[in-house]
Amino acid sequence: MRVNEDTALRGHRVLLVPYEPRHVPRYHEWMKSEELQKLTASEPLTLDQEYDMQRSWREDSDKCTFIVLDREQWDRGCPEDRCMVGDVNLFMVDPENHSLAEIEIMIAEPMSRGKGFGEESVRLMLYYGTTTLGISTFQAKIGEENSTSIRLFNRLHFNKVSYSSVFQETTLHWEVSETERQWLLDSLHVTVESYRGMTQKCQESDVYH
């Protein structure tokens, strides 16, 4: 989705940035993990296929993704690809209704789990979806064995709406009422920045140092 190609969302712990070609090699290494393939219901791709997928995320109007960076590492001057810890995605599940979207979160780096990165990333994506994309219903589909993710979405006021015994997954929804919108805004610290401006400042800082 091109709407977020120059958007960075800065929270307390994480920095969300658009999925760029520079991120693909690290992402490709993550997705060699059988654990992540199972949790994300993904098939392993070649590096060329991963670049094609990145272009799809950029071009397709029914998809929106951000790469999750460890903000502390970024602020210390860590190269962007080495600050990557995961990604957060939105899929517009109904071509006729872009107010409904499925949300996914993946913290791929094992050492970065359990630090609140996933929860803050989801909060930031909920904020972006409601304020910029006009989404009023978010859904999450989670395998029954992924109890950590189910607890995370329950904390974020998602409610169970169905269970599939065939796919062994639970579907949860978050409806964006005015009360829920205010709850999200009150619980979130976010700064919206230009991604190009942010990376340019970083490059200029590297030159002077």
Image (spheres, rainbow, N blue to C red):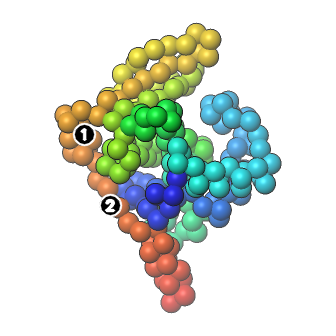
**Whether residue 155 can be seen here:** no
Q: Secondary structure at mark 2?
A: strand
Q: CA distance from mark 2 to mark 1?
A: 17 Å
Relative to 73, 187 lies left or right? left
First reached walking from the N terminus: tag 2 or tag 1: 1
Vertical placement of residue 118 versus 28, above or below:
above
Vertical placement of residue 190 versus 208, above or below:
above
Figure disc tally: 2
Q: In the image, residue 154 lies at what x, y percent?
A: 37, 26
Q: Which residue is mark 2?
A: 191
Residue at 38% in and 47% down = 133
Between 14 and 43, the one lying in front of the other is 43
Q: In the image, residue 55 lies at what x, y percent?
A: 65, 55
**Whether residue 189 can be seen here:** yes
Residue at 20% in and 36% down = 178
Residue at 72% in and 40% down = 33
Hey, which residue is sitting farthest bottom in the picture?
A: 208
Q: Which residue is mark 1?
A: 181
What residue type is disc 2 on?
Thr
Label placed on residue 139: none
What residue type is disc 1 on?
Arg
Residue at 61% in and 16% down = 167
Q: In the image, residue 182 lies at what x, y percent?
A: 20, 41
Q: Residues within 10 Å of mark 2 (few under 14, many from 20)?
A: few
Between 102 and 69, the one lying in front of the other is 102
